[in-house]
Amino acid sequence: MSAALIIDAAGPGLSVQDLGRPLHGAQGLSRGGALDPLALQEAAALLHAKPAAAIEMPGIGGTFRVTAPTRIALTGAPMKATLDGTPLRWHAAHPIAPGQILKIGGVERGVVGYLTPGAAIATEAFLGSRAAHLNIGIGALLQPADTLPLSDDPAPHRPACHLRAGGPFGARFTGGTVRLIPGPQSALFDDAQRTALTAATFTRGPRSNRQAMQLLSDTEPTWHRAAGGLASEPIQAGDVQITGDGTPYLLLAECQTIGGYPRIGSVHPADMGRMVQAGPKPELHLTFIGWDEADALLATHTAALAKLAASVTPLVRDPADIPDLLSYQLISGVTAGDELG
C-alpha cells in the first residue's frame, strides 16, 4: 500500500487546504486556501520544506493514522494533541510511525489549527492547488474513513522540533489591535464614521465561516452608510464590508469576487492571522494606517516570515513522558579522563 494518512474520526469542517489559487478572480474564483496561511508557513519551517497542503481543523480535530513513517507538524490555533496517549507539544513537528494513533481535540485558544504531514498530501490538484473550495464546489469536507494519499517524507525520522515561544507570530490568538489600510471606497466614509469604528470594540460573531467573519459590537454602528446606487466592484479577502444594518464583515478565503456593500478599508496582511484566529471572546480593535506605515509593516512582516526557520529548535522531551526511558543511552562522551594529558 502506498503511503497514506487515514482519518478514523473527523471533527466538523475538516478540509485539505494549501495557499490556494491566486489570479483567478476574473473567472469568479476567489483565492481560497488556508484561513491562516501563517500556519502553513510555520509548518514548512518545522518540516524544512516549502508550504504544502494541510488538514485545516476549525475548532475540533480528529483521530489519524499513517501507513508509513513520517513527521507531522501541528500549527495554527493550539489544540489538545496526543500520540498513543502521550501529550504532544503544539507549534512543533513530531515523528509518527505506522500503528501509532494521533488524536487532536479542541482548540485551547484561537479558531483553526493545522495538521501538516512531512510526507506531503498528494491528492489530485485542480488549477494548481489541492485546496478544497467549499463555496464553489471544489473538493469536500473530510469524513471518517477517508484516506489521503501521501508522497515520501525525505526525513521521516528527523527528531522532534518546535518553534521557540510559538515563533514570531505566536501571539495572534488573543485578539488585539488590527490595522486597516485605505481602499477604493474608504473616502465614502467621513472622519466621524471612521473615528466611531476605531473607538468600538468588536468580537467574532456566530455568522462566521470560510467566506467572511462577522464583527459584533455593543456600540451603535454610526459608521453605517447606505449602499443605495453603489455599483458592485471586485472585492478580495481582507476587505471590511459594512452591511445594511451597519455590521462589519471581514471577507475571508472563500469570499465572493464581486460585492456591492461599501468597504471601509482592508486588513493589512500582517494582521489577517490575528483577525482570523480571534475566537468569540477576545476583543478586537480597528485602527487606520497610511500607506507609508503599511509599506514598512509589510517589509517587517516579510522579514519575519523569512526568519521563521531560525525560530525552530530541537524539542527536549520531558522524561516523565518517555515510557521506554531506560532503553535510551543516557550517558555519552564517557572517557578514561587522561586523553588531555
Image: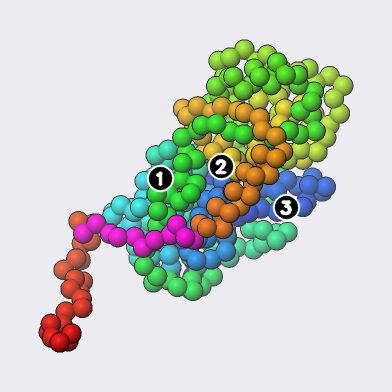
Q: Residue at x 56, y 46 (%)?
A: 36
What is the x, y in percent for residue 312? 43, 59
Q: Which residue is mark 3?
A: 22
- Foreground mark, 3 or 2, reads 2
The quadrant in which residue 213 appears is: top right
The answer to whether residue 194 is left or right of residue 324 is right
The answer to whether residue 165 is left or right of residue 340 is right
Magenta highlight on residue 239: no
Q: Amino acid at mark 3?
A: Pro
Q: Which residue is mark 1?
A: 79
Mark 3 touches mark 1? (CB < 8 Å): no
Which label was assigned to residue 273?
Answer: 2
What is the x, y in percent for residue 69? 41, 70
Q: Amino acid at mark 1?
A: Met
Range of the magenta residues? 309-319
Q: Mark 1, residues whose alpha carbon is within 10 Å: few (<14), some, or many (≥20)?
A: many
Who comes first in sequence, dot 2 or dot 1? 1
Q: Mark 3, residues whose alpha carbon is within 10 Å: few (<14), some, or many (≥20)?
A: some
Magenta highlight on residue 314: yes
The answer to whether residue 166 is left or right of residue 294 is left
